[in-house]
Image: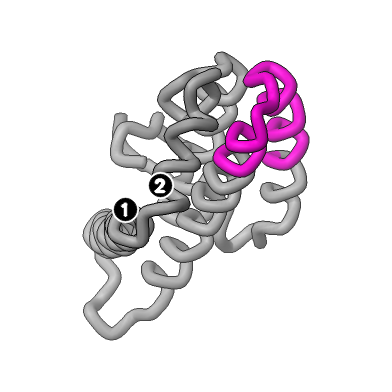
Amino acid sequence: MRGRAKGESAAAAVLRELREEVEAVSPRIGLAPGVARFMRVVDEAPALRSRLWAIGQETLGSLEEALREETGAPPGDPLPGLVAGQINWVYQTVTTVIGREMGAGRAPAEVSREVLVLLDDVEELLSPKVLGYAVRADG
């Protein structure tokens, strides 16, 4: 989000980067043959599930803080947190579907194609307010 292009919103940047990773069938987003075994280990370990949840909460907080900083929103303004929640929902939805499908032993390329359709559906659900929030003014 911080590295987005001039004229690009926060949500657009995240959607773009997710699409690039999914199109590339990138292991960084979980599209790799060995992920099924890893997902089983995580699912069977409450401490690992808990840590993944905590990392997600830290990421959400950091995103809200970055949006608040970049937009100059005052401390009581709920909008940066609401937009951060929507962006986080997009990321979590995509990575959850990838994890579930890879955990089921599916082929990365096949999952990638389906997740690209999912990304289109997710983007359609986002409001213009979210899609247009925190547009980068400088280069």
Tag 1 near tag 2, CB within 8 Å = yes
Q: Position of residue 4 (x, y in %)?
A: 38, 33
Residue tagged by mark 2? 42
Main secondary structure along the magenta-highlighted residues: helix
The residue positioned 46% from the left and 51% from the top of the image is 43
Residues rendered magenta in the picture? 99-119
Task: Tell me if I can see residue 42 in this picture.
Answer: yes
**Spatial separation of the CA atoms under disc 1 and disc 2:** 6 Å
Judge whether residue 2 is colored magenta.
no
Answer above or below: position of 21 versus 60: above
Q: Quadrant of the C terminus?
A: top left
Judge whether residue 104 is colored magenta.
yes
Answer above or below: position of 110 versus 71: above
Front in this rendered view, residue 116 or 98: 98
The residue positioned 65% from the left and 28% from the top of the image is 105
Classify residue 16 by image quadrant.
Answer: top right
Specify the amino acid type for callout 2.
Answer: Val
Residue tagged by mark 1? 48
Front in this rendered view, residue 117 or 48: 48
